[in-house]
Image: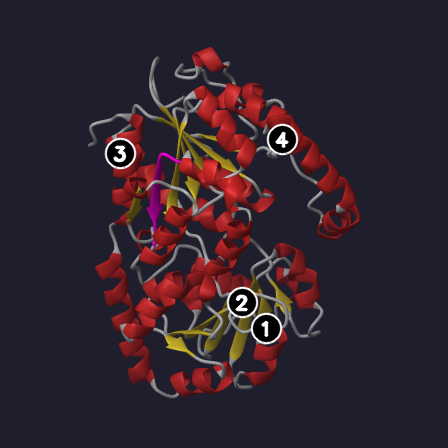
Amino acid sequence: MGKALDIAYAVGALVSSPVWGYSMLRTGKWRTDWRGRFGVGVGEAMGCRGENRGGRAKPQAAGTGEREAASGEGGKTLLIHAVSVGEVSLVRNLVEYFEEYEPGVRVVICTTTNTGFTRATALYGERHWVVRFPFDFSGAVGRFLDAVRPDVVALTELEVWPNFMEACGKRGIRVAVINGRLSERSFKGYRRFRPWLRGMFSSLSAVGAQTEDYAGRFIEMGVPRERVNVLDTMKWDAAKIVDHVDGADELAQEMGIDRGRPLIVAGSTGVGEEKMLMERCPGDVQLMVVPRKPERFEAVAGLSSEMVRRTRPGEAASGGRLFLLDTMGELAKAYALADVVVVGRSFNGWGGSDPIEPVALGKPTVIGRDYHNFAEAVEALEGGGGLVVTDRPGEVVAGLLDDPGRCEELAKRGREVILSRQGATRRHAEVLMGLLELTGG
């Protein structure tokens, strides 16, 4: 496949360059680690050559500071690929599991996006190598794998690429999909090319699927049935059942939020939702919007001259009503301050964002009817009485603010659902330990 696919990729990139080129210039995404994306310099960044992958060198690694490789000579290497911020945070408990029970395994985390790399460096950079996942050109993939030399690769949710899978097969590297998700929309697209993709899917050593439906789609794409297990989603485990988040009080103070007035937090919002909520939410409450994409911060800030931005604390003024959290990694702090949470990308056709985190924090949570990205979680929470699904967020929010008893019941039942579903991380870890040929801790 290699060279022929490389040519196809190159032609496709050239033809589509006006589109992606303009997008990268507009959003600033052209400022990225281009060498890493082509698999160049990964070995130097990790401070080791392939044959020394289990050594205890103390190099500087792509801005991650000094740290020792986790394993001794001859130790196993697990490469965990998490595309962006959400997946990077999702695998946190999995990484901690290996730290606690299998400290001899060297864990390497790789990401695709700039925001994902930044978040991974903050979470794991002091203890593990954080590297950039390469483009799926055969040369880039080969350089990357020769430098990292993993024994097992864990792809979060899906992220199977033809050249990458072929290169892993030639090197005897086992590849698993963890927290496997194959939505109906994606499945329809993959199914059109099933004759060409079946070999790629059939080479997967294991799939830990979130649901029976997802498992069936992986099997239909060619993964042998005996390699597919339904393990639930690790998102339940990522949720922390706590009543306080460090830094939340400081956030409120620095942005000028009045703790004596109700605050609605709209998290991970998409195009059109901020304006809609500004118009529909009660006028006597405070509203904080947290766009999911940083490239939208400026556009959202322009919706109102009264918008107070996190990055410009000098503009904070008492009595303000509208707030914009234009930073990354502080969403949990915002949720912790909320009286009611509205989960974004669920009112504009984008499939919804994750509702589990605010529910775990004990917040009455509202989501729109377009939640197909998180259908199983939303339906479990709604079915358990811990989440409100609506196409009228303004009315529902107003009703919740007037009914503290209902808010308390929503929070209580939502947390009960989360606690009843936890445990998927350990099940995924056991699958990976089996592939690594470890006995377990």
In front of the other: label 4 or label 1?
4
First in sequence, mark 4 or 3: give its number: 3
Q: Disc 4 on helix, strand or loop?
A: loop
Q: Quadrant of the C terminus?
A: top left
On the image, numbered disc 1 is attached to which residue? Answer: 273
Residue 181 is situated, as x and y percent measured from the top left of the image, at: 42, 52
Asked if residue 8 is positioned above or below residue 86 in the image, the reply reads above
**Label tally:** 4
First in sequence, mark 3 or 1: give its number: 3
Range shown magenta: 204-210
Q: Nearer the viewer, residue 441 or 348?
A: 348
First in sequence, mark 2 or 3: give its number: 3
Q: Which mark is residue 345?
A: 2
Q: Which mark is residue 100?
A: 3
Q: Nearer the viewer, residue 109 or 428?
A: 428
Q: Give the Cα distance between marks 4 and 2.
A: 32 Å
Task: Work out whether residue 39 can be spotted.
Answer: no
120 on left or right of 364: right
Residue 389 is situated, as x and y percent measured from the top left of the image, at: 41, 77
Q: Nearer the viewer, residue 52 or 211?
A: 211
In front of the other: label 2 or label 3?
2
Asked if residue 226 is positioned above or below residue 78 in the image, the reply reads below
On the image, numbered disc 4 is attached to which residue? Answer: 137
First in sequence, mark 4 or 2: give its number: 4
Q: Few, some or many C-alpha atoms within 10 Å of disc 1 (few <14, some 14-19, many ≥20)?
A: many
